[in-house]
Every structure is written in structure tokens, then in C-alpha cells.
Amino acid sequence: MNKSDLTEAIVSRMGLPRKRAESVVNLMFDEMTGALTRAERIEIRGFGSFVAKQYRARTGRNPRTGETIPVPAKRLPFFKCGKELRERVAQPAPPLVVAPAEAG
């Protein structure tokens, strides 16, 4: 699923105009990005949490040449799955039912 799929789901379920649904999706992602940029934690009950983790500078190695290279400190987003989502995803998927081909 991508942003346009999410927008389409909102349009079909909520009956919102496409432009309005697109604005809602963009606003949600903009707010989440802003919160992570400000080093705030995002928690969505039943789904999971997002945090920006700080990684220290270190010495890495170029796998092709074996040369050591400095890797600068960085902050990256990290997602931790919530218990409810983990349990729902772990359940077996329902079997795919394929209609038999019509005899001609």
C-alpha cells in the first residue's frame, strides 16, 4: 500500500472528495515527520510507535575494498510494532478462493 492507495481507501470508506482525502493523508504524514524531526515519540495504540534513534559515529568498512571509512553520527526513524498489530499479522491468511474456469 502506498499514499495513493491510502487516499483511495479514505475516499471509498468515508465518501470524502479525493482532494480532501489527499489533504488528510498529507497532513498526517507531515505531522508525523515533524514530530520525529523534533525528536518526539509517536504512539498509535494497537498499531505501534515511531521514534528517532540517535546512532553514534563509528568506523565502518567498505565491503568491496576492505578500506576503513568514517561513518558520521546520524538520527534515523525506528518503528516498533504494537502487540495488537503483531497478533493480527501473525494469524494465518484466509485461503485464496479461485473461481473454476467455465467449460466451453
Image: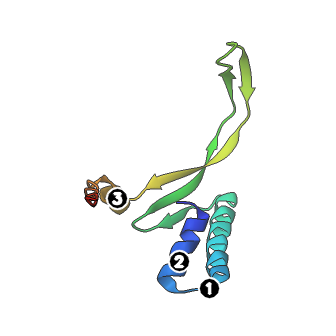
Instruction: Name the spot of residue 25 as percent of width and height, x first.
Output: 61, 72
**Amino acid on which disc 2 is placed:** Ile
Q: Point out the frontmost of discs 1 and 3.
A: 1
SS at mark 3? helix
SS at mark 2? helix
Instruction: Name the spot of residue 59 as percent of width and height, x first.
Output: 68, 23
Residue occupying the point 67% across, 80% down:
19
Instruction: Name the spot of residue 1 as percent of width and height, x first.
Output: 52, 60
Of marks 2 and 1, which one's residue comes earlier in the chain? 2
Q: Around disc 3, counting alpha carbons within 10 Å, would you say few (fewer than 14), some (14 to 19), or many (20 or more)?
A: few
Q: Is residue 61 above or below residue 4?
A: above
Q: Is residue 59 above or below residue 8?
A: above
| Left or right placement of residue 58 versus residue 79 in this view | right
Task: Name the foreground residue: 56 vs 44.
Answer: 44
Task: Name the foreground residue: 77 vs 12.
Answer: 12
Of marks 1 and 3, which one's residue comes earlier in the chain? 1
Kindly indicate the quadrant of the structure image that contains residue 3. bottom right
Q: Is residue 28 above or below residue 2?
A: below
Q: Point out the frontmost of discs 3 and 2.
A: 2
Q: Real-space Cα distance between discs 1 and 3?
A: 34 Å
Residue that numbered label 2 is attached to: 10
SS at mark 1? loop
Q: Real-space Cα distance between discs 2 and 1?
A: 9 Å
Quadrant containing the C terminus in the rendered view: bottom left
Q: How many marks?
A: 3
| Left or right placement of residue 79 versus residue 90 in this view | right
Residue occupying the point 57% across, 86% down:
16
Q: Which mark is residue 83?
A: 3
